[in-house]
Image (cartoon, rainbow, N blue to C red):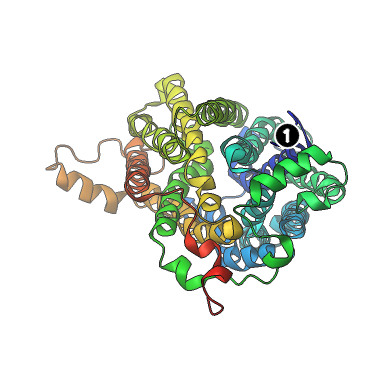
Amino acid sequence: MENKAPFFGARHVQCILLFLGAAAAFAQRANLSVAIVAMMDKNSANPNFEEYQWSEQTKSYLLSSFFWGYFVTQIPGSQLAHKFGGKITLLLSITLSAILALLTPLSVRLGDWQLLCALRLCQGLFQGSTFASIHTILSKWIPAEERSSLGTFCYSGMAFGTVLMMFVSGWIASSTFGWPGIFYFAGLISVVWGFIFYFVGTNTPSECKSMTEAERLYIEAAIATTVKPEHEQAIMKTPWLKILSSVPFWVVLLTQATYAWGYWTLMTQIPSYMKSILGQDIQSNALMSAAPYLADLLLTFVFCFLSSFLIKRSYISINVSRKLFNTIGFWVPIVPLILLGYMRADQSELALILLVIAVSVNAAGNLGFLINHIDLAPNFGGVLMGMASSAANIMSLLAPLAVGFIVTDAVRIFSIYYLYRKLTFLFNGLHLQKNVLQWRIVFYIASGMYFVGNLLFILFGQTKIQVWNYPKRQSTTA
């Protein structure tokens, strides 16, 4: 007899918790991107708090420092999640990082940008296991036919956390709390989430006491063919050599890396772009910066519904769905990104529309590469996510540094640029960080990354479960 899944059940509760966990994690990441505008411009925020005269290069160090630590703990974090379960690693990842968020204003006061940079690095170290933990939990809870919708819903928490942070940052920075309140807000909501997740979150359906027997049977029957039973999984060794020689895995790794460059270029630099090119103050800056991510969040639900509808009605296969939505998410934003490089200060409305399109449509990629790790190897979904995230976060680290280099070192960059253009004019009105031509290079690079990443995914990406997902069945030495 076919097991019927309840319309709303325990698996949905777990997904909501993962959604909120991703939101808390990203609120902690996005807080500096919006707060740093107020920290470096006393006139645009609360004048009672200190202003810091940091250079663009120093700012790029601060915005990228989180990823220095984040890169280091990706693979170790995924192994811990694989061994001990995703709940404990996710809980520690977000709550320990939240404590450091609460200490951020004090660290700046005591040690200026150097101590802030060190603190952000430590936050990255703690959060290194975040998404490997989420992948590990999803692989135990979500059947394949619901993976596109529910899995992507969980990761839409990234956009929600970003929207929330950008929406409230302008008000907080201009209130009696000042820019320190931005960090206190991100830290407090993360601690509250951790308290709830400790009591309600679980690693597997077998640990959940509040679910119905019908739902438990539905999940166990659907996942039994792809994931090893819990007692076998505990002794399953990671087939490192087979993973590293797998073409489908390398494809998803490279796709994720190119996505990270484009996503984090926009995530960390939109507030600065709004201020330097469009001349927006901190309050309107925050609202305008949040608009693309609000659209991202809304479109994610649309894409989830559409993907689920197409797959359940058998209009398209899972493989076609992954590549279709990945293409929408990667290639559609290319045109608005390139056009952003041609905006002027008096075109802020058009620039905002282009940003909304570029960022929001990018959400479709989450239904492509982002859950492809579990397609390839449900038993090692968290491990694959950790490895791919490690590579992706090299890009996340380099992207803000590249912006700092391009926007600061104008003479070198544009000497080459204008030489190529046969010196048609000589630096007329060149203002270093406010020159739109510098941002044009930034957006061209991000567009190129998106194009190459999706091309690889279309040509070589797969959704078939790989043989090395079952290492014990191959040999005792795997």
The image quadrant of residue 165 is top right
| Up-down relation of residue 35 to residue 170 (above or below) | below
In the drawing, does residue 258 fall left or right of residue 218? left
Q: Residue at point 58% right, 71% down?
A: 472
**Quadrant of the drawing holding the N terminus:** top right
Relative to 403, 33 lies left or right: right
Q: In the image, 357: left or right of 186?
A: left
Q: Furthest-bottom residue in view?
A: 477
Where does label 1 land, which residue?
172
Residue at image x 56%, y 38%?
148
Q: Which quadrant of the figure has residue 286? A: top right
Image position, residue 459 (x, y; %): 31, 47
Q: How many marks?
A: 1
Q: Is residue 148 above or below residue 248?
A: above
Q: Position of residue 434 (x, y in %)?
A: 40, 38
In this picture, is 444 found above or below 111? above
Task: Name the spot of residue 187 as percent of width and height, x first.
Answer: 76, 47
